[in-house]
Image (spheres, rainbow, N blue to C red):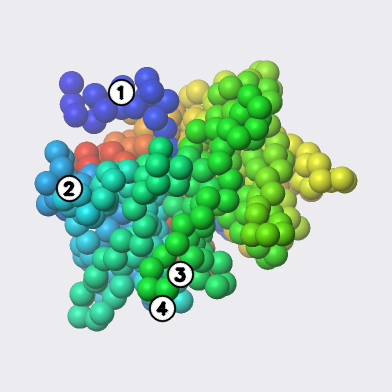
């Protein structure tokens, strides 16, 4: 049994699936799929967090394993991909994580960039208390990047500040960072250091009606409210999960409102993955995915604000096992025309079942049309993970955690 087949079976049994995205199709031409990087293990392995793009078109991301760190299988890296003149992409390793009790290790989340080009992210382990860190990479030119650990989780008694984050970060206009590490937190610059504040602890309501477990990467609206998911908890079942909003209140407090509690009732989805960040359209509607539920393989959902603080859920698509893909574990992205793109970590090719890239297009009658844009086969990647990224030309970029030439994952581009 090959290494890829073995990992596929393990991941499938654990429902360890992941999702990505695709591009708007404006013609009848088939999308063009291109491999930009094949990870080798020593040069990184398993890009779970997808990629982010800068103003020059360079891509940045992390791998959860690989590199030359002293962890078994490597501690992970931060990488950059730069487009070359001949159409090839050049990979540079910006930072290798170490298992030394100070640096982080095992980054599963994606990255964000500030206006100066500095890179921010999280690791799920490592650091002073071995429970993960928030880090910054600062560029000093000539390929030199310095890492600064901004915060070490589990610095407080009983880890009341959170720990082991697998979700990423979002930055507000003032440069404050927000994330989720079994709670929702804020990091703000203090006097020469960064200060962490827990905005909401999951499972602080009776029977965990406010959600529990890991949270997704938060998003911010124009007025500074935060939106995220929790993968478990809620009023309907202990493992269903919720969509929540956090609003700044007086005295520096934040008020949590559960916008939707998922239900294992054969119709609604449940268990939104901690890699399945929400998106918001220009009208304030929220879109996301759940790993499971619906008829049988997860859903894509829309939440619309109605009266008195209530939100209405609309199920846009029910996934079913098979050639069209199932079990999305990352969220969706939206193009300027309102089309949604995502990936599944299961289904697709009958020879592999390595996942698909899909498109959901709105129609005039309020329905959504589903189409598969690419089926992964193993050699071109397997099990897409993390959110995808759209550039200003409509190209979409993402990663798979397995597959490729050495079964250590790939970064890909999909062009209309």
Mark 2 lies on a secondary structure that is loop
Judge whether residue 1 can be spotted in this image. Answer: yes
In terms of sequence position, does the residue under pointer 4 or pointer 2 come before the other?
2
Image location (x, y in percent) of residue 302: 69, 42
Say if 402 sits above or below 104 in the image. Answer: above
In terms of sequence position, does the residue under pointer 4 or pointer 1 come before the other?
1
Image location (x, y in percent) of residue 405: 19, 44
- Name the residue carrying label 1: 10
Is disc 1 in contact with disc 2, using a CB cutoff of under 8 Å? no
In terms of sequence position, does the residue under pointer 3 or pointer 1 come before the other?
1
Mark in the foreground, 4 or 1: 4
Disc 4 versus disc 2: distance between alpha carbons? 29 Å
In terms of sequence position, does the residue under pointer 3 or pointer 2 come before the other?
2
Mark 3 lies on a secondary structure that is strand
Q: Residue 116 shows which numbered tag?
A: 4
Disc 4 versus disc 3: distance between alpha carbons? 16 Å
Disc 1 versus disc 2: distance between alpha carbons? 26 Å
Mark 4 lies on a secondary structure that is loop
- Name the residue carrying label 3: 189
């Amino acid at each position: 049994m090959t290494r890829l087949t073995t990992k596929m079976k393990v991941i499938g049994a654990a429902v360890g699936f992941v999702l990505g995205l695709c591009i708007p199709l404006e013609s009848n031409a088939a999308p063009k799929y291109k491999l930009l990087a094949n990870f080798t293990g020593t040069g990184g392995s398993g890009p779970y967090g997808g990629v982010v793009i800068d103003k020059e078109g360079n891509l940045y991301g992390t791998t959860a394993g690989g590199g030359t760190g002293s962890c078994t299988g490597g501690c992970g890296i931060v990488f950059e991909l730069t487009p070359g003149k001949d159409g090839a992409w050049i990979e540079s390793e910006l930072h290798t994580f170490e298992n030394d009790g100070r640096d982080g290790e095992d980054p599963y989340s994606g990255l964000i960039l500030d206006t100066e080009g500095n890179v921010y992210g999280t690791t799920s382990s490592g650091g002073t208390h071995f429970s993960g860190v928030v880090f910054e990479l600062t560029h000093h030119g000539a390929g030199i990047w310095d890492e600064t650990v901004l915060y070490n989780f589990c610095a407080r008694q009983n880890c009341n500040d959170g720990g082991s984050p697998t979700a990423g970060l979002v930055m507000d206009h003032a440069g404050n960072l927000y994330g989720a590490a079994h709670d929702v937190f804020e990091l703000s610059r203090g006097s020469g250091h960064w200060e962490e504040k827990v905005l909401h602890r999951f499972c602080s309501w009776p029977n965990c009606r406010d959600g529990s477990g890991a949270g997704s990467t938060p998003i911010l609206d124009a007025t500074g409210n935060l939106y995220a998911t929790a993968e478990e908890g809620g009023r309907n079942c202990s493992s269903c999960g919720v969509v929540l909003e956090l609003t700044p209140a007086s005295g520096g407090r934040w008020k949590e409102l559960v916008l939707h509690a998922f239900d294992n009732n054969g119709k609604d989805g449940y268990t939104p993955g901690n890699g399945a960040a929400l998106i918001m359209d220009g009208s304030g509607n929220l879109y996301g995915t759940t790993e499971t539920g619906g008829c049988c393989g997860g859903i894509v959902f829309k939440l619309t604000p109605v009266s008195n603080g209530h939100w209405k859920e609309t199920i846009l698509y029910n996934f079913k096992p098979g050639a069209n893909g199932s079990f999305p574990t990352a969220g969706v992205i939206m193009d300027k025309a309102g089309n949604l793109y995502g990936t599944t970590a299961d289904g697709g090719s009958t020879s592999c079942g390595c996942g698909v890239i899909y498109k959901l297009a709105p129609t005039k009658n309020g329905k959504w049309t589903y189409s598969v844009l690419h089926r992964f086969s193993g050699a071109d990647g397997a099990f897409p993970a993390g959110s995808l990224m759209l550039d200003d030309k409509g190209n979409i970029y993402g990663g798979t955690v397995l597959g490729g030439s050495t079964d250590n994952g790939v970064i890909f581009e999909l062009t209309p």
